Image (cartoon, rainbow, N blue to C red):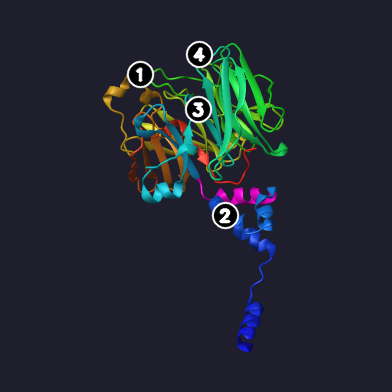
Amino acid sequence: MVRKRRLRSDAANNSVFLPMELIIEILSLLSVKDIVRFKCVSKSWNNLTSDSNFVDKHLKASSRNPHLTLSWHENNAELTKNVVPVSVHRLLKKQSATVSSDDFHRMENPSRFVGSCNGLFCFLSWIPLAQPFKYFFHITNPATRTRSEQIEFTFGEDFHFTFGYDASNTTYKVVAFRAKEISNEVKVFNLGGNNCWRNIQNFPVVPYIRFDHYYIIPSLNNGAHLYGTINWLALDKSITPIHQFVIVSLDLSTEKYKQFLLPLGFDHAPFSQPVLRVLMDCLCFFHGFNLTEFILWKMKEYGVQDSWTRLFKISYQNLAMQLPIRLRVKTYCLHYPLACLYVNGDTVIFACECCKKSLIYNLKDKTVVKIKSRNTIYWFIDSKDYVESLVSVH
């Protein structure tokens, strides 16, 4: 008995005390799945991991493990579409994008994946043939497997939607716009607000919207979200002698617009539409040139014209994706031959929508590895950046 008491006393004396700062640091590096389990340890841990400061800290740490969202139709069934996040590390290591899903990841039909921001997904659905056009949208967090209630609203047709975050007001916003050559209309919805749409100032330059007649898909220019702004490519018809592409940017905090010019080396209208995308935490755009090369530009300092840098120019032959003769006619592949989804050092992930394929390219040794998948994945449209988070859907 005396010996047992000594052992307990020694164990108590040897117990390790961890300061709360260190506990917070350790917890912030864990996956959302682990943190959700640890919420059950004690009431204090539940309060700690639910605190907004901890949620922000965990979100920042999660950004070191980037994901891409993948969407596909299950068993080629057009009525069952799934959207799930997949770790880029997994794609690079296994070179496989075969994924599975469950009811939580299945989208209603008809519906559209609007975008991803801070670990939240925004989905839009609608009632076909309804007059006036009736929409619904809802927010999900795939990491915590939580879903908001649907928000119903009535609009006219031909609206495009995008999703972003106003950090200065800690508010998530959905932007809806209808772009026409003569006129345009822009509306904003604040999540968690009074559940109504507000009209804001129209675009000074109308975003370039083009639908493809061969594939029923949303536009590639629905907006790139970066640093509390949403950015679109637009054609400025006041610039002569040609209609030149510019970037129109909406600040979600002030709800005012700015315009940026594309780099000086990009002084012509390319055959294929340029595409804006956030890569390496910077605003980038890419385009094909003469059906032979893929070019990617990077704005190193957001909003600074002189910071544009041509990151790389790659021959389609190097990518083992030379366009066949049959695609010299006006087809989908001709206009949207390739997309850049991820860049880190010499490693690049590309995707081709028309053939539903993706590949890993090494800029240094020019090697190509195709990503295998048993799913028919819509890489080009719905592959968006994603990070795990504890952000609430409410």
For label 3, the residue is 112
Q: Is residue 326 left or right of residue 4?
A: left
Q: Nearer the viewer, residue 5 or 217?
A: 5
- Seen at 63% across and 80% down, the residue is 8
Circles 2, 4 touching at the beta carbon (< 8 Å): no
Residue type at the position of mark 2: Arg
Q: Gap between marks 1 and 2, in whole Å? A: 54 Å
Marks 3 and 1: which is nearer the front?
3
**Residue 12, above or below 288:** below
**Label 3 Cα neighbours within 10 Å, binned few <14 / some 14-19 / many ≥20:** some
Marks 3/4 in contact by CB < 8 Å: the verdict is: no
Residue mark closest to the camera, 3 vs 4: 4
Given the image, on which type of amino acid does mark 3 rest? Answer: Arg
Q: In the rendered view, would you say 344 is above or below 375? A: below
Magenta part of the chain = 53-66
Q: Which residue is mark 1?
A: 330
Q: Residues within 10 Å of mark 2 (few under 14, many from 20)?
A: few
Q: Residue furthest bottom?
A: 2
Q: Secondary structure at mark 1?
A: loop
**Mark sitting earlier along the chain (3/1):** 3
Nearer the N terminus, badge 2 or badge 4? 2
Label 3–label 2 contact, CB within 8 A: no
Q: Amino acid at mark 4?
A: Leu
Q: Secondary structure at mark 3?
A: strand
Q: Is residue 56 magenta?
A: yes
Q: Is residue 3 magenta?
A: no
